[in-house]
Amino acid sequence: MSGRDEAEAGGCGTGPGAAGLGAPLGERATLVQFSSAFCAPCRATRRVLGEVAAMVPGVAHVEIDAEARLDLVRALGIVKTPTVLVLDAHGREVRRAAGQPRRADVIAALGEAV
């Protein structure tokens, strides 16, 4: 994905799962966005991920307020917003990137999860 790939820092293969997120996973994949209130790129990221989730059947977009979920932020090693995790159908992290992603990169990253 566009932005700085952080696969090496995120321990790919594990993930928060539905219980950790507090939201249901997508049938095929889940795009998890960590945001903060005053993050301008977070708004654009929300739009891109929402559009991709609406376009690809079985994909869900979950946005998490990083300030409200510091426990999850720390557990997953999130260091900046926006950070996007791509989870497979079982809630395992398959890709991670920090920064505002491009739509084409998000779609390509989903290819690894489905």
Image (cartoon, grey):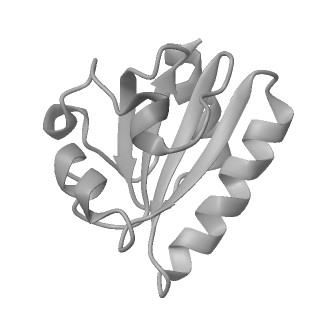
The picture places residue 39, in percent across and down from the top left corner, at 47, 81
Q: Is residue 77 above or below residue 64?
A: above
- Of 49 and 101, nearer the camera is 49
The picture places residue 113, in percent across and down from the top left corner, at 52, 16
The picture places residue 101, in percent across and down from the top left corner, at 53, 53
Q: How many marks?
A: 0
- Left or right: 15, with 37 as reference point: left
- Residue at 40% x, 53% y is 3
Q: Is residue 44 above or below residue 22?
A: below
Farthest bottom residue? 38
Quadrant placement of the C terminus: top right
- Of 16 and 78, nearer the camera is 16
Q: Image quadrant of residue 25?
A: top right
Q: Is residue 82 above or below residue 6?
A: below
- Left or right: 102, with 48 as reference point: left
Q: Image quadrant of residue 108?
A: top right
- Residue at 62% x, 33% y is 24
- Residue at 74% x, 38% y is 53
- Of 67 and 2, nearer the camera is 67
- Residue at 38% x, 23% y is 94
- Of 26 and 86, nearer the camera is 26
- Left or right: 56, with 10 as reference point: right
The picture places residue 73, in percent across and down from the top left corner, at 27, 56
